[in-house]
Image (cartoon, grey):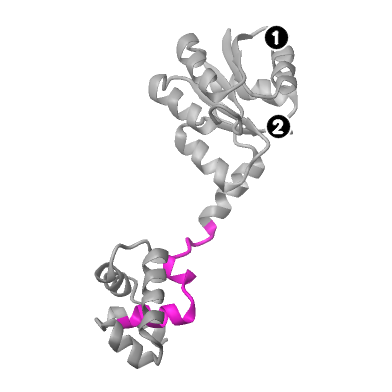
Amino acid sequence: MIRVVIIDDHDVVRKGIISFLQTEDDIEIAGQADSGFKGAELVIQEKPEVVLMDLIMENGNGIEATRQIMTSYPECKVIILTSYYDNEQVIPALEAGAFSYLLKTSNAQEIAEAVRKAAKDENVIEPKVANTMMNRFRTPAKKPHEDLTERELEVLLCIGDGMTNQEISEKLYIGIKTVKTHVSNILSKLEVNDRTQAAVYVHRNQLFKTAGD
């Protein structure tokens, strides 16, 4: 028998899944919970083979609950069952240790089959989720300096040249206060602590070469 725990804060969804899985001869419901916190505690206590986990819940989301379960009971196979398949949900869930990822548009038989496959160490990734993951790797990661305005980039290049605020002010014909504002914005957008780190960023990313192209 495959022991399963269902974690979902929607009573209708949770009870519907339970009602169907209870009709399957090889699946046993080991417990249910309506929040991530309760669910993680239940799973660690009951030690089921498989967990069906919702993502967006009050009192502990599915990602954090999955992480807790994987830390204390890594043998468990967590199947995410959710309506969300964007990168903000998919990637963190898989990084937390989720084994499979299904959407709630899946029918009952597909969910049951995913449970059986998980018990046999075979994962299932919803096609839409797989496409989302592939698109993430096809799209080059955006670099912080690409969010700078044209003027901020000019100021950053000056910082890379080792120029002071006064020298930047004279070169770009802008006031000292304006320069300081630009510098502050630049440090924030690049997520660096000071001008030295900003200058290092310029050279590391070869921004002088890019600006000259």
Instruction: Say whether residue 151 is magenta.
Output: yes
Mark 2 residue type: Lys
> Quarter-wise, where is residue 31 in the image?
top right
159 and 164: which is toward the camera = 164
The local secondary structure at tag 2 comes to loop
The numbered disc on residue 179 is none
Which x, y percent locates residue 162? 24, 81
Quadrant location, the N terminus: top right
Q: Are marks 1 and 2 in contact (CB under 8 Å)?
A: no
Boundaries of the magenta span: 138-158
Which x, y percent locates residue 203? 29, 74
Up-down relation of residue 178 to residue 17 (above or below): below
Q: Which residue is at a point 56% across and 47% down the rendered structure image?
A: 87
Q: Which residue is at a point 70% across and 24% down the rendered structure image?
A: 10
Secondary structure mostly seen in the magenta stretch: helix
The local secondary structure at tag 1 comes to loop
Q: Which residue is at a point 56% across and 51% down the rendered structure image?
A: 134
14 and 182: which is toward the camera = 182
Mark 1 residue type: Gln
Question: Label 2 belongs to which residue?
Answer: 104
- The answer to whether 42 appears left or right of 174 in the picture is right
Local packing at callout 1 (Cα closer than 10 Å; few below 14, some 14-19, many 20+) is few
Mark 1 or 2, nearer chain start: 1
Up-down relation of residue 127 to residue 205 (above or below): above
Local packing at callout 2 (Cα closer than 10 Å; few below 14, some 14-19, many 20+) is some
Q: Which residue is at a point 72% across and 31% down the rendered structure image?
A: 106
Q: Is residue 119 visible?
A: no
Q: Is residue 142 visible?
A: yes
Question: Label 1 belongs to which residue?
Answer: 22
